[in-house]
C-alpha cells in the first residue's frame, strides 16, 4: 500500500503487514515528520465525506450562477446601455434557456406526464 506523509510532499510504498489493524506510528524518512498511520480499510471510510463536500460545492456553484443570472436579468436594460457588448451574453443565455426548456418538454413527454 502507498501511504502519504502528513507534510503532503512524500509518498511511501509499504508492505500491508507493516501497518496493523489498530494503526501505528510512522516517521517520514525525508522530513522526519511522525504521524499515526491507519491501514487502508479505515482510510476508505473517510472518502464518502468528500463526496458530501462535492455536492455542497455543486449546490453553491448552482446557487451563485442562478443569482448571477438573476442580477444580470434584473439590470438587463441598464447594463446593455452601459456595455453594448453584453447583448451577446443575453442572446447566449436566451438560447440556453430555450434549449433547456425544449429538453425539459421532451423529457416530460417521454415520461408521459403531458397535460
Ligand atoms: Zn515528509
Image (cartoon, grey):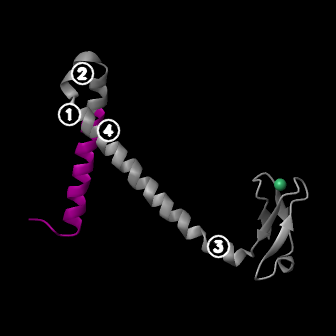
Residue ID for mark 3: 44
Q: Along the polypeptide, which appears first: circle 1 or circle 4? A: 4
Q: Along the polypeptide, which appears first: circle 3 or circle 4? A: 3
Tell me if label 3 and label 2 are in contact, CB under 8 Å: no
Q: CA distance from mark 3 to mark 2?
A: 52 Å
Residue ID for mark 4: 68
Badge number at residue 38? none
Residue ID for mark 1: 74
**Going 31% across and 20% down the picture, which residue do you hit?**
85
| The C terminus - image quarter | bottom left
Left or right placement of residue 52 versus residue 111 in this view: right
**Going 81% across and 81% down the picture, which residue do you hit?**
20
- Span shown in magenta: 92-115
Residue 106 shown in magenta: yes
Predominant secondary structure in magenta? helix
Residue ID for mark 2: 80
**Going 50% across and 60% down the picture, which residue do you hit?**
53
Q: Is residue 25 above or below residue 20?
A: above
Q: Quadrant of ligand 1?
A: bottom right
Q: CA distance from mark 2 to mark 1?
A: 12 Å
Q: Quadrant of residue 39?
A: bottom right
Residue 2: x and y in percent read 79, 66
Q: CA distance from mark 1 to mark 3?
A: 46 Å
Q: Along the polypeptide, which appears first: circle 1 or circle 3? A: 3
- Using a 10 Å C-alpha cutoff, classify the residue at mark 1 as few (fewer than 14 neighbours), some (14 to 19) or many (20 or more): few
Q: CA distance from mark 1 to mark 4?
A: 10 Å
Q: Is residue 50 above or below residue 97?
A: below
Q: Along the polypeptide, which appears first: circle 2 or circle 4? A: 4
Q: CA distance from mark 2 to mark 4?
A: 16 Å
Tell me if label 1 and label 4 are in contact, CB under 8 Å: no
Amino acid at each position: 500500500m502507498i501511504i502519504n506523509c502528513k507534510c503532503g510532499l512524500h509518498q511511501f510504498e509499504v508492505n500491508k503487514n507493516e501497518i496493523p489493524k489498530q494503526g501505528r506510528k510512522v516517521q517520514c524518512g525525508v522530513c522526519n515528520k511522525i504521524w499515526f498511520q491507519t491501514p487502508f480499510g479505515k482510510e476508505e471510510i473517510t472518502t464518502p465525506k468528500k463526496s458530501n463536500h462535492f455536492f455542497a460545492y455543486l449546490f453553491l456553484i448552482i446557487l451563485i450562477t442562478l443569482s448571477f443570472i438573476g442580477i444580470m436579468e434584473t439590470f438587463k436594460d441598464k447594463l446593455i446601455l452601459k456595455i453594448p457588448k453584453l447583448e451577446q451574453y443575453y442572446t447566449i443565455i436566451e438560447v440556453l434557456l430555450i434549449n433547456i426548456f425544449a429538453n425539459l418538454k421532451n423529457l416530460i413527454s417521454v415520461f408521459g406526464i403531458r397535460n
